[in-house]
Every structure is written in C-alpha cells, then in structure tokens.
Amino acid sequence: MNKYIRLITGIFLLCLMTAPVFAETTDDYRFYELGERSAALAMEKLDFEYGDSDVACFTDAGRVLINGYTTQKAISGITHVSGLQNSDDTLFQINRADSKPLWFYFYNKNTGKGLYLEPAERYYSMTKGEIMNLAEEGAFSKVALVTGDIDKMLANTEDGDATQKALGANAFSILSLSNAWAHGAPYDLMYAASLHNHFCPGVSSGYILVKYVEENLPLTKDTSYVAMSAPTWCKEDIFPTIWDMTPGKGGVLNSVSFTSDDQAYLTEKYGTRPAGIFILWNKKAKTGTGLALGFDFDSSVWTGPSWGEKVSKTVDMVENLDNYDKYVTVMNKFSVDEKMLAELKNPQNNPYAVCGMM
C-alpha cells in the first residue's frame, strides 16, 4: 500500500514539475521569445545599443498567422530587448496577407547593413523546454547579413545582387521601406507605405498630392475633403490612412466611364498626367472649391540594374516631398455647388467632363 501511495505521489510531483513547461509553451510565449531572439541577434550582428534611433526593425509580425495563431507578441519581444518601437519611428509592421511567412529585418542606416531573419518551421512546434535549450540562431532557418543601403548596392552591384538573392520575394518591400525611412520619410507616410506593404513612386505621389491639397485648400469649420480618383494607381492607399477614406465608409470616388483615351487626351491638352479631382466641401454652406491636379513622375531613363530603379526614385521623392512644383500641376480650379457635386460623385460620369475640362 505504501509503495502504491509513493508511486502515485511521485507521478503527481512529476506532473507538477513538467506542467509549467507544457502549459507555458503557448504561442504568445513562442512568438515573444522569437521577437527577443531576433532583436538580440540584430544587436550583435549590426552592433547597436538599446534604443538606437539609427536602427529600425521592419516585420510582418502581427499581420501574418502561423498555424492559425496571431504573431503580434513578437513585437513586444523585439521592443523588450532592443528598445525599438513604433512610437519612436524605429519599428514598423508591414502589411501582408495572413497566409504569408513571418520575417524580420533590422537596418542600421549608419553602416548601411541589414539583418534578415526567417524563422525555422520546426520552431513553431517546439515545447518551452526545447526552446530554452535552443541556441539563439537555432530558431531561424535564414540569418542573412546584407548590404541594405541602395547607394552602396548600386555602387557595388555584386553586393546588390547578393542582397536581392538573400531577401528573395521580400527584397523590394524591405529595401524600399528601409531606405525611405533612412532618408527621412515622415511617420504618417511610413504608416501608409507599411499598409501598402512597400514604398514606391506611386504611393509617394499620393502623399504629395494630399499634402498639396491640405496646404492649398486647408480645412476649416464645417468643411471636409471629397476625392475623385481618375486614373487610379498606388496613390489610393494614402487616402485611407491620411484622410480616413476607407472603402467601407465610401472611400475615394471612382468613375467607371473614365478611359485610357480620356487620360491621353487630358495629358496632351494640359501637359501633365491627370491624378484626380479634390474638393473642399462646406456642408453648411453647401458650396465648395475643386482642384483637378496633374502629377509628373521622373521620366529620366534608368540605366542601372532593374532592382534599383523604383527604390532610387522613391528615395529622391522622399527627399523632395515639399517640392510641389517638381511634381504637381493645377489643371483646373473651379467652384462646386450641390448639383455639380452630385454629378461628380456619380460613377457613370467622367468627372473631368463634369467640371468642363473635356
């Protein structure tokens, strides 16, 4: 009987000892630990201290799901170890479909070096005990130290090619975002580009257009903006973040009758590519002012490697965000009443025809 009691007691004690190991191997712990490990490796390989404002982390943690679990705890782990955080403009969550793989990229703008990390699939099924006994790099299937500065990549295209290979399908997204950040892209633009999941001349043009409108048609009491997008391009992803124009709330208005021939006609007539119509509307007075704006991109011939063009032109635009004359042309400025506003909002109408431009 005593032997039986001792056996039961032993089994019970063993359960108590091992229960925390299994119970605490939650996905919250797993991803928090993964974030900590990624930050520790980055601090070692990129040689930076806690809270270094010249280093930023870019990741799709919190956007993607792994085995059905959310991954946002990795963000807390990164901040805990490295001090990098969104409120300091040093940590950005990049939008991805939730089915995509998890990755981390740390970039030191002083050295131009970046560290790219992809977690190992086997890590996601490890117990806490296995994770605790795992070497720091053991959580990752890829640990790649790369040249991330676009100017250095272009100066030595072998390094640039190696970076492209190491980053794979994420190369353009990572390099455009990190280089734009390094060249001073403001937080609100970084936020919008993170939603867009990369930086490009298109999304930069949307930001320049929005800021031009805000400066030249400033909001006052009882006023709001109405935007007609024709033609559409990457600029549309600026409006949900800067002006809260999301599709579910009506968003940016579009015309189903605006054609490529219409675009060509307006470009030839006004000497600039049409970019949309923006209205400052006074809901109390029921009147408004409209601007039909054109946008000119850099049309110079690119002679470098194909992977460098959009990133380089994005950096140039980031450095000239307030140089409106370089990009924006007022094609038409006009007054708007209720009748015209209704006609402009009708998707069956060509908005440029409504305001007398065609």
Image (cartoon, helix red, strand yellow):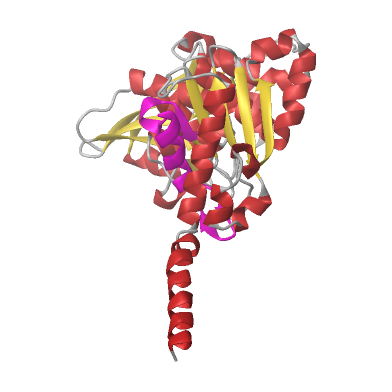
Number of marks drawn? 0
Rendered position, 350 above or below 213: below
The answer to which of 232 and 41 lies nearer the viewer is 41
In-image side of 194 versus 280 (left or right): right
The residue lying at 73 percent from left, 30 percent from top is 166
Residue 94 in the image: state x and y as whole percent.
53, 38
Magenta stretch holds residue 60: no
Q: Nearer the viewer, residue 138 or 227?
A: 138
Res. 61 in view: no
Left or right: where does residue 242 sit relative to residue 123? left
Nearer to us in this view, 97 or 37: 37
Horizontally, is 8 left or right of 117 in the view? left
Image vertical order of residue 237 relative to residue 182, above or below: below
**Residue 28 placement, left or right of 230:** left
Residue 44 seen: yes
Where in the figure is residue 276, as x and y percent of width and height? 50, 30
- Residue 336 lies in quadrant: top left
Identify whether 304 is placed above or below 236.
above
- Front one among 93 and 289: 93
**Rendered-image quadrant of the N terminus:** bottom left
State which region is magenta.
63-92
As for residue 75 lying within the magenta part, the answer is yes
Q: Considering the image in quadrants, where does the C terminus appear?
A: top right
Residue in view at x 35 percent, y 23 percent:
214
Q: Looking at the image, which residue sits at the far front?
A: 2
For image coordinates 21% across by 35% down, the residue present is 222
Q: Residue at x 45, y 59 (%)?
A: 24
The picture places residue 122, in percent across and down from the top left corner, at 67, 53
Residue 199 horizontal/vertical position (percent) = 57, 27
